[in-house]
């Protein structure tokens, strides 16, 4: 019997205010929830959402600017590399021209020096030939006078004068 009494008491309690009692508190709680959601949305979520959107826009703009700068930098680097290559080609051409000119000048100077050396060699050879001829002429005169003196001494003065 006590068991039945407790069961009846539980049934009475369940009928009075159960777990899902649908009275005026449910709509009041729903209104409180909606008001809280509106207040949170106005004071917290919208400013936070705006700040996040502004940050995204800022990041997106910075990325676009960085990409533009990168492309400009790459174009400038290509331009500078092209200019550097052109400058190197010009420098190599100038060096090659200068070397060719130097070789030409050196060849001309070498040829001039060889001509000058040849002229001096010929001049010296001519001088030697002239000195040789004058020495031979002088020697011939001395040989003639000496041979005349030798003949005079050997043969006597008569024979030499007949001749």
Image: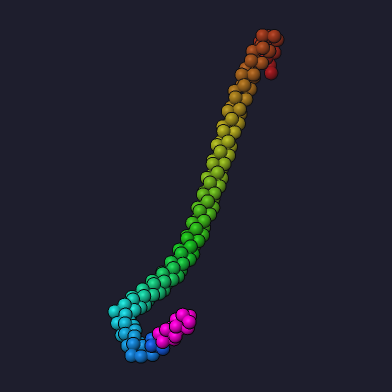
Q: Position of residue 100 (x, y in %)?
A: 54, 53
Query: Residue at the location (36% across, 88% down)?
Result: 26
Q: Is residue 113 above or below residue 137?
A: below
Q: Where is residue 78 in the image (x, y as percent from the top left)?
A: 48, 66
| Camera-side residue of 162 and 72 | 72
In the rendered image, the quadrant that contains the C terminus is: top right
Q: Is residue 8 magenta?
A: yes
* Residue 40 quadrant: bottom left
Query: Residue at the location (40% across, 85% down)?
Result: 13
Q: Position of residue 33 (x, y in %)?
A: 34, 84
Query: Residue at the location (47% across, 60% down)?
Result: 84
Query: Residue at the location (67% across, 12% down)?
Result: 150
Query: Relative to 54, is 112 on the left or the right?
Result: right
Q: Is residue 155 above or below residue 52?
A: above
Query: Relative to 23, is 116 on the left or the right?
Result: right
Residue situated furthest front in the rendering: 1
Residue range (magenta): 1-13
* Residue 38 quadrant: bottom left
């Amino acid at each position: 019997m006590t068991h039945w009494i407790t069961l009846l008491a539980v049934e009475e309690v369940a009928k009075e205010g159960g777990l899902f009692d649908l009275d005026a508190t449910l709509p009041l709680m729903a209104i409180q929830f909606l008001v809280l959601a509106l207040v949170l949305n106005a004071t917290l979520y919208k400013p936070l959402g705006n700040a996040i959107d502004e940050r995204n826009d800022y990041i997106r703009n910075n990325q676009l600017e960085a990409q533009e700068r990168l492309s400009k930098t790459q174009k400038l680097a290509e331009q500078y590399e092209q200019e550097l290559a052109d400058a190197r080609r010009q420098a190599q051409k100038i060096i090659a021209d200068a070397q060719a000119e130097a070789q030409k000048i050196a060849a001309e100077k070498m040829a001039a020096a060889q001509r000058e050396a040849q002229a001096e060699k010929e001049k010296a050879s001519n001088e030697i030939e002239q000195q040789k001829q004058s020495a031979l002429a002088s020697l011939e005169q001395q040989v003639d006078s000496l041979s005349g003196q030798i003949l005079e001494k050997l043969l006597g003065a008569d024979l030499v004068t007949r001749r």
